[in-house]
Amino acid sequence: MNRKLSTLMLAAAALLASCSQNDELQSTVNDNEGLKPMTISVTLPEGMTTRAIAADDAEDAHCFVQILNEVGDDLEGGHSAVKGMTKTGNGYTATVYLKGDEYYNFLFWATSGNEEPDDLRNVVYTNGETLAWAGKESAAWSANGVSCTLKHVVSRITLTTTTKLSVSGTNPLTITVPTTYTAYNVLMMEPAGAATSDFTYTFDPITVSGASENSPVQIGRFYALVNKEPQVLKLHYDGPLGNPEKEIPNVPLAPNTHVVLKGDVANFGLISGTITATVDNDWIDQEHPFENL
């Protein structure tokens, strides 16, 4: 046997061995263990013109998935660990292996922060700092995979002013939201645990000019994890005239809701009054006796 023929035979044997291994792996996945590959994908909300969602809300987002059984408990073998998804175009995708005859809960969490959650049934959230989305799909294995569009789990609060304003370290501006939460349960799609109280957001220094009733200027915005109950917000601009803290009643805060607060921030809380002095021409005579010292 010549050297060239020997080399071809070895290459063919290696190829057959490789094919055999792949076939064996495929058989194990699809038959012996009953597991089948399935693609899952998510998209973040977009457009929503009635709520003026800005394009930068979705920048640098990270998306995670967690798979639970039909009743929301962990799968056997540690297969319910939170898994990072891969960004593809306008969405995120991942491939998982599931049993074709079972039902699953797919939980999704996306955030512009960098923390990877340990469990999507209790995701820690930092009010004011991180925008977050969540979604849940319940389904069995499908050759077409499963997809879900996530919704905002926070309320976005934007403050605008109708008059000129100067916010600084000397004259800070704050908004207090009385009832917020610091955790979210994606399985239940609602805030988790007990509510915290008095989350106060401090706006960055800014100088505003040219604002008017018909052309308000944005001072800033932040996000809060809340429930669906209207709240009484507290706004305090510690301006040069010593504005007192004032309340903004009945603000409809809710997840996936954008609230724009509009008003005269510089003079909010100040009472405007007029002092008028007049002269009475009808004299009132009054004696004031004195003695020489």
Image (cartoon, helix red, strand yellow):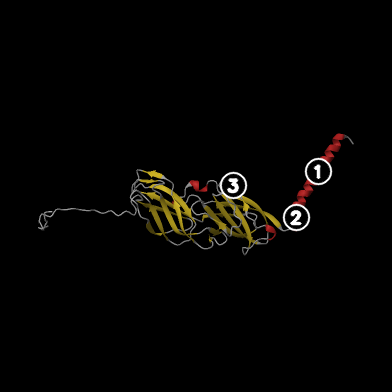
Outermost residue to the top? 3
Q: Which residue is mark 2?
A: 28
Q: Which residue is mark 3?
A: 87
Q: Is residue 170 left or right of residue 125?
A: left
Outermost residue to the front? 293
> Foreground residue, 21 or 9?
21
The answer to whether residue 50 is seen in the rendering is: no
The answer to whether residue 166 is seen in the rendering is: yes
Q: Residue at x 76, y 49 (%)?
A: 22
Rendering quarter of residue 80: bottom right
Give the CA distance from mark 2 to mark 3: 29 Å
Q: Is residue 30 left or right of residue 84?
A: right
Outermost residue to the right? 1
> Vertical placement of 18 versus 185: above or below?
above
> Foreground residue, 280 or 61?
280
Residue 119 appears at what percent x and percent y? 60, 57
Q: Residue at x 75, y 55 (%)?
A: 28
Q: Which residue is mark 1?
A: 14
Residue kind at label 2, given as amino acid type: Thr
Rendering quarter of residue 70: bottom right
Give the CA distance from mark 2 to mark 1: 21 Å
Residue kind at label 3, given as amino acid type: Lys
Residue kind at label 1, given as amino acid type: Ala
Which badge, 1 or 3, comes first in the chain's sequence?
1
Which badge, 2 or 1, comes first in the chain's sequence?
1
Determine whether label 2 and label 3 are within 8 Å by CB.
no
Which badge, 2 or 3, comes first in the chain's sequence?
2
Q: Residue at x 46, y 51 (%)?
A: 222
Specify few, some or many for label 1: CA neighbours under 10 Å numbering under 14, 14-19, or 20 or more. Answer: few
Specify few, some or many for label 2: CA neighbours under 10 Å numbering under 14, 14-19, or 20 or more. Answer: some
